[in-house]
């Protein structure tokens, strides 16, 4: 059985080897009630700043858990070819799935994009969804072994991203009309960013903005993929080319 992993953050005080560390509230309930752990069981803690700590449960009750911190292991499980996923916002359950699987597949950061054909929501609901996606990213890191949580930036429109957020470096955008495959493009030019459209794809104005910005349209074969499938397939392709899956 794999050792359970918990994200504890670096504030207000990170774990210190040889010292006790207290878990309270939600984390304590998770350990005691959801995981049904007992005194003497082992857990791993990570703060999001790199590496992880071995720990052993010293005491446990319904509201508090005390751990004894062991050694710090500087292990990292990041991909050798970090890619930012720019994902157009799609249906809630599928967007949640994209965030979770993108973290598992090693995405360095995720940019939620409000495209013309994305589902639109109020500012208040968008803020709630952003917080929700960040919680999903943290849980995915706990599950997959990553010790650095990918940044999920605030939602931007396509035009805002092009004008203010667009980074330097090769950028590939999935488009069924692309002349080159992502695999061929990535094999010759390691993309720093992969852009995925919403259900129905990007509209003509967005495609024009992308071309004018030098973004390269690429395809993923002869079949039309759903938005969430495109994200998984693109990240897996880059991982394979980078040797991350070998």
Image (cartoon, grey):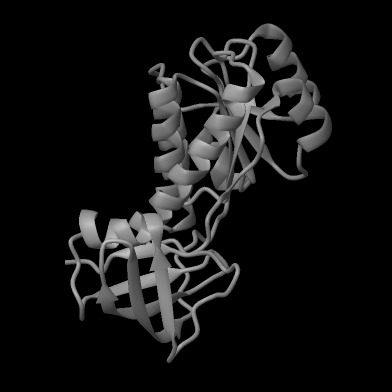
Name the residue: 38% across, 63% down.
6
Q: Residue at x 18, y 61 (%)?
A: 36
Q: Position of residue 46 (x, y in %)?
A: 46, 68
Q: Quarter of the image containing the C terminus?
A: bottom left
Residue 118 vertical placement versus 228 (above, below): above
Residue 167 location (% of width, % of height): 76, 42
Q: From the top left corner, tell me how far across and down residue 5 is, in percent.
A: 34, 64
Residue toward you, 51 or 174: 51
Residue 222, by quadrant, is top left
Position of 228 compared to 212: left or right?
A: left
Q: For residue 172, what is the image quadrant? A: top right
Closer to the camera in the image, 8 or 64: 64
Q: Is residue 33 visible?
A: yes
User: Which residue is rendered at x = 55% and y = 51% of the image?
Assistant: 150
Q: Quadrant of the image for the N terminus? A: bottom left
Q: Is residue 187 left or right of residue 114?
A: left
Above or below, comparing residue 4 to residue 59 in the picture: above
Nearer to us in this view, 207 or 154: 154
Q: Position of residue 224 (x, y in %)?
A: 41, 16
Residue 240 visible, this angle? no
């Amino acid at each position: 059985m794999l050792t359970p992993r918990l994200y504890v953050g670096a504030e207000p005080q990170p774990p210190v080897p040889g010292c006790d560390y207290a878990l309270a509230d939600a984390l304590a309930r998770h350990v005691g009630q959801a995981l049904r752990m007992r005194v003497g069981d082992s857990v791993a803690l990570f703060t999001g700043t790199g590496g992880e700590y071995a720990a052993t449960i010293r005491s446990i009750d319904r509201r508090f858990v005390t751990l004894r911190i062991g050694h710090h292991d500087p292990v990292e499980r990041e991909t050798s070819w970090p890619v930012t996923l720019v994902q157009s916002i799609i249906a809630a359950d599928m967007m949640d799935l994209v965030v979770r699987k993108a973290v598992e597949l090693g995405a360095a950061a995720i940019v939620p994009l409000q495209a013309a054909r994305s589902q639109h929501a109020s500012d208040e609901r968008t803020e709630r969804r952003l917080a929700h996606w960040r919680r999903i990213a943290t849980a995915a890191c706990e599950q997959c072994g990553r010790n650095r949580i990918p940044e999920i930036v605030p939602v931007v429109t396509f035009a805002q991203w092009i004008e203010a957020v667009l980074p330097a470096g090769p950028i590939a955008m999935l488009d069924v009309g692309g002349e080159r495959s992502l695999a061929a493009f990535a094999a010759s030019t390691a993309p720093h960013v992969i852009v995925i459209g919403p259900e129905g794809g990007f509209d003509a104005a967005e495609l024009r903005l992308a071309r004018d910005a030098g973004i390269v349209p690429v395809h993923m074969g002869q079949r039309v993929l759903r938005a969430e499938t495109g994200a998984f397939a693109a990240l897996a392709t880059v991982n394979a080319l980078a040797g991350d899956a070998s």
